[in-house]
Image (cartoon, helix red, strand yellow):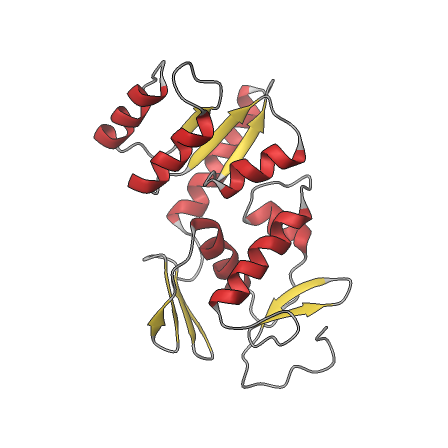
Amino acid sequence: MCSASTGLEALSRIVETRPDVVILDLGLPDIDGLELLKMLRAVTNVPVIVATARDDEAGVVRTLNAGADDYVIKPFSTEQLDARIRAVLRRSRGTAESVITVGGLTVDAARRTALLDGKPLTLTRKEFGLLHHLASRWGKVVTKRELLAEVWQQPYGGAEKTVDVHLSWLRRKLGETAEAPRYLVTVRGVGVRLVDPDEPLGDAMS
């Protein structure tokens, strides 16, 4: 384990040592923490947990959208941080079925790739995590609360709007909309489910 007192020093060490996980404090003396996070995401997919004193919803959403895998709000206990590190590492190493195929969609957890009708999809880390989680439970309704807990590692709830936004982005890349879905079907008042578009949807579609 190593530490750095400035953002640029941290970036250099992360590139050199390739750690399993990064704990990033947004309050850096030389660079804005979110800018450093974006720089990290340009060069590495290392899991990043952000430590922040910013507990407003907009700030949290910006942090997640910038590429954070999870966040902890100061003050936090060592036990809480350890639990979040273990959870992020489980997600990054992958414990579920490696390759999932639903209709023309193929999701490979080990390679972190997804194909639609044989063509690769360009997905962010969170979009891939969202797609993989839904694909691993395809045909079943998944609540937004579950998605927040499993994909965003927020077991005590969070901004469901974040899920809605990422679902919207994912639908666009799958070539569909909420009004005309193929794979991602909204179930009124419950959640969303990933389906095989060649199979009947029943009456659960919104």
The percent position of residue 47, horizontal first and vertical second, equals 40, 38
Image vertical order of residue 164 relative to residue 104, above or below: above
Residue extending farthest to the left is 16
The image quadrant of residue 10 is top left
Q: Is residue 66 left or right of residue 200?
A: left
Q: From this viewpoint, is residue 199 visible?
A: yes
Q: Position of residue 7 (x, y in %)?
A: 36, 21
Quadrant location, the N terminus: top left
Residue closest to the eye, 1 or 192:
192
Residue positioned 25% across, 25% down in the render: 12
Image spot of residue 146 (x, y percent): 64, 52
When asked about the image quadrant of residue 15, the answer is top left
Q: Evaluate whether residue 44 shows in this view.
A: no
Residue at the spot x=53%, y=59% of the render?
Answer: 169
The residue positioned farthest toward the right in the image shown = 189
Q: Residue at x 45, y 26 (%)?
A: 33
Label total for image: 0
- As rendered, which of 119 and 48 lies closer to the eye? 119
Task: Name the side, left or right, on which 204 lies relative to 103.
Answer: right
Identify which residue is drawn at 48% across, 60% down: 132
Image quadrant holding the C terminus, namely bottom right
